[in-house]
Image (tube, rainbow, N blue to C red):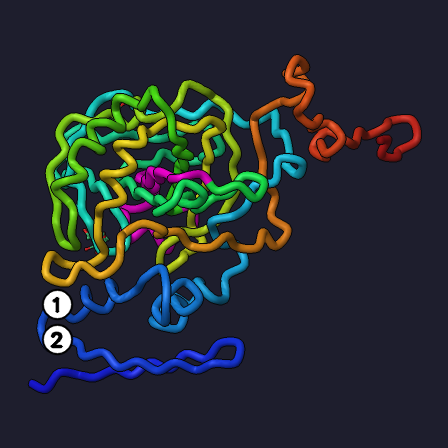
Amino acid sequence: MPSPVHTFCFSSAGFIACSAIVLLCSSEVLSSWEEWWTYDGISGPSFWGLINPQWNMCNKGRRQSPIDVVPDKLLFDPYLRPLHIDKHKVSGTLHNTGQSLVFRVDKDTKQHVNISGGPLAYRYQFEEIYIHYGTENSRGSEHYIQGYSFPGEIQIYGFNKELYHNMSEAQHKSQGIVGLSLMVQIGETPNPELRIITSTFNKVLYRGFSTPIRHISVRSLLPNTDHYITYEGSTTHPGCWESTVWIIVNKPIYITKQELYQLRRLMQGSESTPKAPLGNNARPVQSLHHRTVRTNIDFKRNKNQNACPSMYKDMYYRANRWSPDTGLLIR
Ligand SMILES: *[C@@H]1O[C@H](CO)[C@@H](O)[C@H](O)[C@H]1NC(C)=O
Ligand SMILES: *[C@@H]1O[C@H](CO)[C@@H](O)[C@H](O)[C@H]1NC(C)=O
């Protein structure tokens, strides 16, 4: 059988780029196709929606992720509950996919880690962790806070176990996915659970390399806070499906300079053609398009931190009350 040759032409703001790729004629075709995307150049984020028609939300979607979180515009929601994540440990495999560093929980796991509560209407099953980071300290995270990018971001993904069978089914369906985002900052007191992952970085130097990770507690990766920021968005990798409830934990976790140095040695390519470093694997921030970003941080109650803006001026959930006398809404 001849190999099918696909030519893609992308046009964007005054330039047109064409590229031909030859897909192997085997059962590998689909997976090669799905893996053919990058964080820069003509297969980068601006073109994800054009590479594959099934990824058109990457270009057309209006509820996309990541976003820049602007603290002044957060809406305090007193009905947001604490988040629940099971404490017990699970095992899995860390993969260098050539685009990211991804941990996937073992398929035969007997007791899965449930994620529920918070803004979630359903119970989600923890499935994978994506690690995003920069090659310099000034960038790395996908979500920004007031225009600030952290050196890294750890994204814990789960799928809606009550409505769907698995991640691949759930990721493009309504309420399919939860994305729990941990900002990573450089510090001297590293997160011990993160160290279980960072100690394996030298085993995943090149694309296609993977290594088992035994007994890791997702709950223990989280910093010590109940505060979070939440909004509805998309997966930050193709196909950018708008199925994701994002929960950004309001405190970073810490990684040491040495661990970050190990991470920055990872490459996008194979051992023989390493190509560029794996870092800077962040999709640019996307427009909010009038979405609401909610928080359970009651800034007014935390009066001692008076640098924080009051949420009450923006608290439209409580702004209006029905008056039985006049039949009017009173402010
Ligand atoms: C997670 O949820 C499932 C389904 O309700 C339940 O069977 C399982 O025991 C839960 N896991 C834990 C650790 O509570
Ligand atoms: C996911 O679940 C769907 C629906 O049950 C099934 O058709 C599909 O084969 C499953 N995919 C994987 C990767 O297990």
Magenta-drawn stretch contains 158: yes
The residue lying at 15 percent from left, 32 percent from top is: 91
Corner quadrant of residue 222:
top left
Q: Which residues are magenta?
A: 150-175
Residue 143 at x, y percent in the picture: 47, 44
Corner quadrant of residue 21:
bottom left
Q: Secondary structure at mark 2?
A: loop
Residue 228 at x, y percent in the picture: 50, 29
Is 181 on the left or on the right of 2, as rendered? right
Q: Is mark 2 within 8 Å of ligand 2?
A: no
- Mark 1 residue type: Glu
According to the picture, the residue beneath numbered tag 1 turns out to be 28
Q: Judge by depth and name the residue closer to the eye, 184 or 299.
A: 184
Q: Is mark 1 within 8 Å of ligand 2?
A: no
Q: Residue pushed farthest top?
A: 304
- Mark 2 residue type: Leu
According to the picture, the residue beneath numbered tag 2 turns out to be 24
